[in-house]
Image (tube, rainbow, N blue to C red):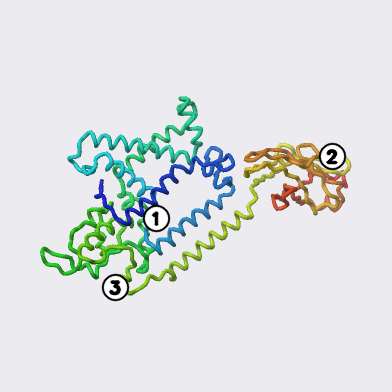
Amino acid sequence: MIISREQKGKIRSLRNLAYAVLIPLYFGLPWLRWNGHPFIRLDIPERKFYLLGNIFIPMEGYFLWLFLIGAGLSLFFFTSLVGRVWCGWACPQTVFTDTFDWIGRKIAGKKYGKKDAPLYKKVLIHVSWIGFALLGSLAWIAYFADPYIMISEIQSGTVFAKGNLWPYFTAFFTFTFYGDMAFVREQFCKYACPYARFQTVLMDDQSYNVTYDYVRGEPRRKGKEKIGDCIACNMCVVVCPTGIDIRDGVQIGCIACGKCVDACTPIMAREDKESLIRYMAQDQVENREAKVKWVRPRTALYAILLLGVLTSATYLLYNRVPLYVSILPDRNIQPMVIPENKVRNFYNVKLQNISLEDQNLQVQLVSKDFSEEPILRVGGDETQTIQLPQNSMLDLRIIVESGNLSKEDIANRSHFIMIRFVDPKNPKFYKEKQVPFTLPADLMGMR
């Protein structure tokens, strides 16, 4: 376990401002509501994902793929521009590890992380960490379960009611969270995070990242002999949360937190010199007059791909109809012949309103395969209007009755009809399904 030395500075202050926004965001998002529904929640038992006033279901999995591809391309794009800015400034692993350090320093002061710290303060630190881990786990579980119900169950003492699983998941994540932040810490970034493994591939000499100016700094001071600007104080190593030496170049362990920048800046300022470690491109080390080329083949390619994914997602969302329709021929009731040269087919229909508004849908039948237009009945009734409440499902049976079948209709055994569900007030709000209309094999008497 590495507990780095506290380091104040400009970068640290900016990161604190970022944390002041991110921590309330991470904890507060599950509590937000949009028209009485979750602002964001992945409801696994109900198989629904709530986001920004929309409800997504598993049949819309392509949105998930677009989201994952967009997130990956965003990492590629921003890493090629500004290095591992996500790791050092917004990743929950970094944010909450720093929060644990803040708690530890508030309790133990300068003795935090040292072997001679009083035992009672060490115990108090770990108890506080477990308490914070419990809050963090509850916040994490709240992305999958209703936090208001969780609080009411805690208040009523029904937490461990039969079938209630969230307390057990909370306990598991509490000790996982505590073990990760208290003992693994930023070593996770170094050894377990997959992003660290390919970040060097995404960066090039024009990436704006935490960089050591080896042209000025090397060779380092040896004893009293001073050749380069680096005085070998090793403060950049002491403050590094992963324990690397930034002077050895870009490494997997560097999370671009900028603590080494804040450590080097005041030391170089004593000699009226610019910091040897700062945010700059690798090319600027060799040529101090060089400017960062933000637009280059790598960044242009990532930007085009990301723009393509975002455009596709925006188009699909704009044209999305929040209605799921499934129509299957009824297996229990086979197509039947009725008097007057007619045939009835039965269909099982499943409708799901995945919007936050009640829908009054009109059922329409479209057919060009028959000489006479078929008749449609919804649930045995001739009414063709369905009331579908918000965020609800409805199972019903639709009966389609053919008109008088001609010899041509009977000769052509393959027929298809289109059943459409449309909102009369909004013609663009519709879903339609093409289904087969089957003629029974015994139609000889109808010829």
**Disc 2 residue crowd, few under 14, some 14–19, many 20+, Cα 10 Å:** few
Instruction: Locate residue 116, reporting x and y percent.
Output: 17, 40
Assign a secondary structure to mark 2. strand
Tag of residue 338: 2
Mark 1 vs 2, N-terminal side: 1
Mark 3 vs 1, N-terminal side: 1
Real-space CA distance between mark 1 and mark 2, rounded to the nearest whole angstrom: 68 Å
Q: Is residue 81 above or below residue 14?
A: below
Front-lying residue, 391 or 53:
53
Q: Name the amino acid type tagged 1.
A: Trp
Instruction: Locate residue 101, reporting x and y percent.
Output: 30, 44
- Left/right of residue 374 with respect to residue 35 in the rendered view: right
Q: Residue at x 27, y 39 (%)?
A: 107
Quarter of the figure with residue 386? top right
- Residue that extends furthest to the top in the rendered view of this protein: 157
Quarter of the figure with residue 133? top left
Real-space CA distance between mark 3 and mark 2, rounded to the nearest whole angstrom: 89 Å
Assign a secondary structure to mark 1. helix
Tag of residue 383: none
Q: Residue at x 32, y 71 (%)?
A: 284
Real-space CA distance between mark 3 and mark 1, rounded to the nearest whole angstrom: 27 Å
Q: Name the amino acid type tagged 3.
A: Glu
- Left/right of residue 384 with respect to residue 58 in the rendered view: right
Q: Name the amino acid type tagged 2.
A: Ile
- Whether tag 3 and tag 1 are in contact, CB under 8 A, the answer is no
Please name the residue that numbered disc 1 is placed on.
Answer: 86
Front-lying residue, 226 or 423:
226
Instruction: Locate residue 291, reporting x and y percent.
Output: 37, 72
Marks 1 and 2: which is nearer the front?
A: 1
Please name the residue that numbered disc 3 is placed on.
Answer: 286
Assign a secondary structure to mark 3. helix
